Image (cartoon, rainbow, N blue to C red):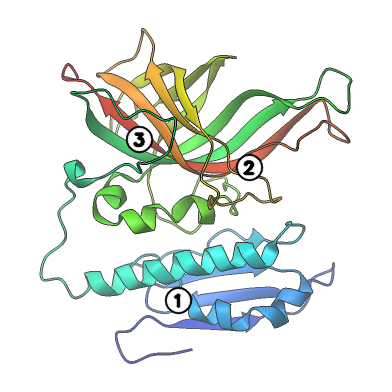
């Protein structure tokens, strides 16, 4: 597919089948020098050419290396996953093209960012707090099945995720931010910790300090936002429209977390919203004693007046 001069263009090639008989679709976006390989189940090569071609994959206006391979084989709904990716890339292409028409670069005003609202059971940030940072988290929700009972529900034992700076995306392109988790959950983190085919810089890590203390470390040399051990303060089921994960797993709950003693730089509250995937199967039947479920989410960090 090609467009007029200066317009995003995407090319599609179908490579020869690999050893397992699965062909690979390869895209090249000449507008952004972007390329991506997708390993698809054979039926999708026939099912989705128009969807694929509609995705211009305009991720960045500068040259970029080849990005990680996305393997859709074995997914519960590979066609749905490809649709989610297509919608994200198409929206990104629109944003890139619109930005080229501006006379000046848009200003990243964090105060303009609006956290999703209207979820029953999740209280708003405390009065007086201001938004400090927005990050997309990509990692795993971790579970255990150690009761020996196959009909028992898996027990959550924490999470591990890499955090990527999405603050300016939240302020300037909130519709795009809302689509990132549904895209990112289908890309496994590379050795370079790249968030799928995006150029979002790393802003920190998330893990559990103990079984009940989610911990966020954003004290990087580039940002120095701070560190925050937290406790769960509110929870709400993800909306019914939330994106599923790699195996069709439901989106994990949205959370409000409050900072514990030891938090730095005035971090007071953290919200986990816009989740994709991460939920375990209903029972432990056929599962190992410990397992992980891939997930993505958007984290909003709120600070107090004493942030320094």
Q: Depth check: 140 or 212 in front? A: 212
Residue under pointer 1: 56
Label 3: few (<14), some or many (≥20) within 10 Å? many
Whether residue 202 is situated above or below residue 148 in the rendered picture? below
Callout 1: helix, strand or loop?
Answer: loop
Q: What residue appears at the point 63 percent right and 42 percent down from the top-left corner? A: 294
Residue 163 location in percent, x, y? 44, 37
Whether residue 252 is situated above or below residue 181 in the rendered picture? above
Sequence-wise first label, 3 or 2: 2
Residue 60 location in percent, x, y? 36, 65
Residue 167 location in percent, x, y? 29, 44
Residue under pointer 2: 294
Q: Nearer the viewer, mark 3 or mark 1?
A: 3
Q: What residue appears at the point 20 percent right and 42 percent down from the top-left corner? A: 110
Q: Nearer the viewer, mark 3 or mark 2?
A: 3
Q: What residue appears at the point 52 percent right and 41 percent down from the top-left corner? A: 238
Q: What residue appears at the point 29 percent right and 27 percent down from the top-left corner? A: 125
Callout 3: helix, strand or loop?
Answer: strand
Instruction: Name the quadrant containing residue 16.
Output: bottom right
Sequence-wise first label, 2 or 1: 1
Q: Is residue 220 visible?
A: yes
Label 2: few (<14), some or many (≥20) within 10 Å? many
Sequence-wise first label, 3 or 1: 1
Residue under pointer 3: 300
């Amino acid at each position: 597919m090609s467009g007029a001069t200066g317009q995003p263009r995407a090319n599609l090639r179908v490579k020869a089948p690999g050893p397992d008989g699965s062909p690979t679709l390869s895209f090249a976006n000449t507008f952004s020098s972007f390329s991506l390989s997708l390993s698809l189940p054979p039926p999708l090569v026939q099912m989705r050419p128009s969807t694929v071609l509609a995705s211009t994959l305009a991720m960045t206006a500068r040259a970029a290396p080849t990005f990680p391979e996305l393997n859709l084989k074995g997914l519960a709904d590979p066609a749905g996953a490809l649709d989610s990716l297509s919608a994200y890339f198409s929206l990104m292409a629109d944003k890139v093209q619109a930005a080229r028409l501006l006379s000046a670069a848009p200003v990243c005003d964090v105060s303009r960012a609006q956290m999703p609202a209207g979820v029953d059971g999740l209280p708003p940030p405390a009065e007086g707090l201001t938004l400090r940072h927005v990050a997309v988290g990509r990692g795993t929700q971790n579970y255990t099945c150690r009761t020996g009972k196959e009909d028992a529900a898996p027990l959550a034992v924490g999470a591990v995720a890499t955090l990527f700076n999405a603050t300016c995306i939240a302020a300037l392109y909130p519709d795009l931010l809302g689509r990132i988790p549904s895209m990112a959950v289908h890309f496994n983190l590379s050795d370079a910790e790249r968030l799928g085919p995006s150029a979002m810089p790393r802003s920190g890590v998330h893990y559990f300090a103990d079984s009940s203390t989610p911990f966020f470390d954003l004290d990087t040399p580039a940002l120095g936002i701070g560190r925050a051990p937290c406790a769960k303060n509110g929870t709400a089921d993800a909306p019914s429209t939330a994106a599923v994960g790699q195996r069709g797993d439901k989106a994990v709950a949205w959370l409000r977390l409050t900072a514990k003693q030891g938090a730095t730089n005035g971090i007071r509250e953290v919200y986990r919203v816009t989740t994709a995937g991460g939920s375990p199967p209903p029972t432990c039947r056929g599962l190992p004693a410990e397992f992980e479920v891939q997930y993505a989410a958007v984290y909003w960090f709120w600070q107090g007046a004493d942030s320094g």
